[in-house]
Amino acid sequence: MSVARVLVIAGSDSSGGAGLEADQRVLAAHSCYALTATTGLTAQNTLGVQDIFIVPAEFVKKQINAGLEDVGADVVKLGMLSSAETIDVIAEALTVHQVPAVVLDPVMVSTSGSRLLPEAAIKGLRTKLLPLTTVLTPNIPEAVLLLKDSGVDVPEPTDLPGLIQLAKQVCSLGSKGVLLKGGHLPLTNDNRTAQNHEDASKVIDVFYDGKDITLFETDYLISKNTHGTGCSLASAISANLAHGKDMRRAVQSAVRFVEAGIKTSIDLGKGSGPINHFHSFYCLPFSPGHFVEYALDRPDVQPAWKRFTEHEFVKRLGDGTLSEERFKSYLVQDYLYLVQFARSNALASYKAGDMESIAASAKIVLHIQRETALHLDYCASFGLSKEQMESTPETIACTAYGRYILDIGQSQDWLALQVALAPCLLGYGAIAQRLYSDKESVREGNRYWKWIENYVAEDYTEAVRLGSELLETHMRQVSPSRVEELIKIFIRATELEISFWDMGLGGKHL
């Protein structure tokens, strides 16, 4: 399995809202591996830049070469470049290492108005980096400044046709494509220049790939949280290119990503705050392979799980004090439940989406068949015949539990059914293991010890391992909200297991 790699060559923002810090958050949200080469350090916050330390160009070169000679990069994203000397070493490195794609955000002035690139360095950026650039992402003032540096004196556009013309002119400077950001030219509904905030309804970004024009329209947002939007947009484009998207799709996805980031931002600081980079990003509340551990440790699961696995019925099995009549009644209902349990696993095999899962569920059905044969032999030792058990009606507890699992299987997906089945599979294994290793358990003369041994046997232990492995594999692929839905199913199934034990003690069941 390969991972998309992006080398970010840019400055550091001590406030975390822009620069390398924002770039890395964007790349993480897009499942990319980020390498960095720091061109400058800034002392800044949401109110503005207080000072800049320029990293020597030779050290920037060492950072770039260290990353590209080892990990490599699918895309290089360029941000604050700090000096003409740094631009020279970057241009040389990009040529030597033949990086597949370059996204250049021509950072010249910060959101708060501080100059981040000396005027003398603009020519180097234009002549040495633009010819190597896949996508250039200037705002309107930056585009005008680049053209002016080339000897083309153009006014800032005042309408959409002017914006489109400016994008084409900038693209002629050497990049394969240009995304001209229209944030400085808010428009009305009929694409006229808005005279004030009240008239403004949208912003149009213009993408030109050297042949076709594509317009990306976004809502005009009145928000102070726009710090790092340029960095974030260019990094999102880089991530999308690294994942194999073409230029237009990479740009479109990035524009929507930043728009949502502004809309969902939360105020931080007293000035221009950052956007929300994680609006579409989620992480599971457990590490891969540890769902069962996580589930059993949850405060909403623990009480039911404890009542199930440490039930009075279970304790009496361990010390041999359970009434034989109560145990025989339990055995009959457990046999009847095993039939429903097998049906549920057969249904799981049908609902599985791949051969491995189909086979795994089928193996569990075969295990239940073997368990049933052992169960019949064990029941016979208590004077219970197969015919006698099959002619006994199910208790309400048995019917409720068995049909609940089947209902989950019919109405929901394969994973929900596995979760509904899990308390039985995992719980019996956990109960038997605890009783088997408990020094207080009675072995000699305990008629129920054979029951305990059946559930610590290699066959059942393997079934628990297989079921747990299946569950862990598929739980990695769900959302946090789905985890919560599945946990509710797990708790309900555990509560129905408790009712089954209550039944074994002769309790009433609804």
Image (spheres, grey):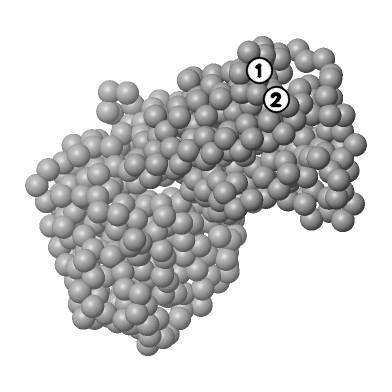
Residue placed furthest toward the left: 211
Q: Is residue 77 visible?
A: no
Determine which quarter of the picture holds residue 70: bottom left
Write the residue at 87% across / 56% down: 439
Write the residue at 78% across / 15% down: 509
Determine which quarter of the picture holds residue 376: top right
Q: Left or right of 423: which side holds 316?
A: right
Q: Amino acid at mark 1?
A: Gln
Residue where numbered disc 2 is placed:
384
Give x and y (percent) for residue 289: 55, 53
In the picture, the disc for residue 205 is none
Give x and y (percent) for residue 441: 86, 49
Q: Left or right of 30: which side holds 204?
A: left
Q: Quadrant of the N terminus?
A: bottom left
For mark 2, give the secondary structure.
loop
Give x and y (percent) for residue 273: 56, 49
Write the residue at 37% across / 57% down: 235
For mark 1, give the secondary structure.
helix
Compared with 480, 389 (above or below) is: above
Residue placed furthest toward the bottom: 58
Q: Amino acid at mark 2?
A: Leu
Residues at badges 1 and 2 in contact (C-beta under 8 Å)?
Answer: yes
Residue where numbered disc 1 is placed:
388
